[in-house]
Amino acid sequence: MEDPNLEIPVSETEARAACSKVLSSEKFLRAPRMRRLLTFLVDAAIIGDRRNTKEYAIGISALDRNPSDYYTAEDPAVRVQVGRLRVKLKEYYQSVASEIEIVIPLGGYMPRFQRMMNRRMDDPKAIIVDEIVSVDQSAVGESFSRGLQEELVHQLFKFLDAHRIIHLRNHDRSFAVSTDRDTSDETQHVLECSTRIESKRVRVYARLLGARNGQIRWSGQFDRPPAEDIALQEELAFLICMALKGYFLHEGEAYQQPNLLRPKVTVHHAAEQLSD
């Protein structure tokens, strides 16, 4: 399948600007070896010189290995340092908003430049779903919130994508579902929801937060006439999921499902303000 990020070519000026932005970040300012390695690889990628992105050439030119006694089979320095660079770049792009992303694919050392605006929802990142809170703390509200939470987690898994890992977290911040996989580096979003039940309406608030800095990235407000049946919980969960899908796709698109009664929904979008 053709990579959608390659549909709009990245110019040399854009590529160099993206590299300069990374190098000037706090994460790279105190990492001279990473700075030198990234600069070398980006320069080679811009001019299309694959010979200089071979392991031996990188070791000699970017890591100061001695040509007379340097053997890549015995010295894993390039593999180790490029692996660290991949991790460092991933952490950087999780904390900033950038139009151009520098990626070093696994299995090679030639960087690739891709436009963030074209990146779809197939990134292996996680959403932590906090336990839904009942604002009025009534028995009815608590029961409704628990049912809504079950529907929401189910539909998040169903309607987003299989690569986006869903974790459920209790009020005490412990995980209700254990996992053998450490997702600390993958986690990017926390979803918080609360419910209010009044005589004439049910209101659900939903907020998407940055997992690292707690900044609000998206906020939604959903109103419906009161009801205690499962259909209302299903519908509200569906609407939250589709609003999130539009957010992740950067298109504001809505998932179309026939024969579903959609209420009038008010959704407020909060501009992302990500810092290094």
Image: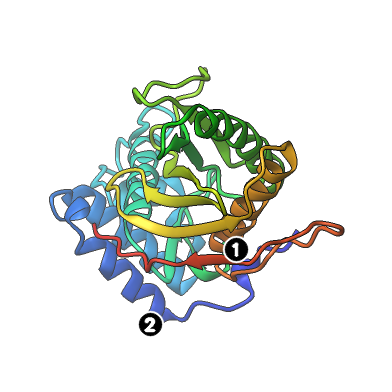
Check disc 2 and give the amino acid type. Thr
Which residue is most to the front? 199
Determine whether the residue tagged by mark 1 lies in a helix, strand or loop: helix
Which residue is most to the right? 259
Check disc 1 and give the amino acid type. Gly
Asked if marks 2 and 1 touch (Cβ < 8 Å), the reply is: no
Question: Residue 87 placed where, x, y %?
Answer: 37, 42
Label 1 belongs to which residue?
A: 246
Label 2 belongs to which residue?
A: 13
**Residue 15, located in which quarter of the rendered image?**
bottom left
- Comparing 259 with 247, the one in front is 259
**Residue 2, located in which quarter of the rendered image?**
bottom right
Question: Residue 85 placed where, x, y %?
Answer: 34, 46
Q: Which callout, 2 or 1, points at the residue further toward the start of the chain? A: 2
For the image, the number of numbered tags is 2
The residue that appears at 66% across and 36% down in the rendered structure is 151
- Please identify the quadrant where the N terminus is shown: bottom right
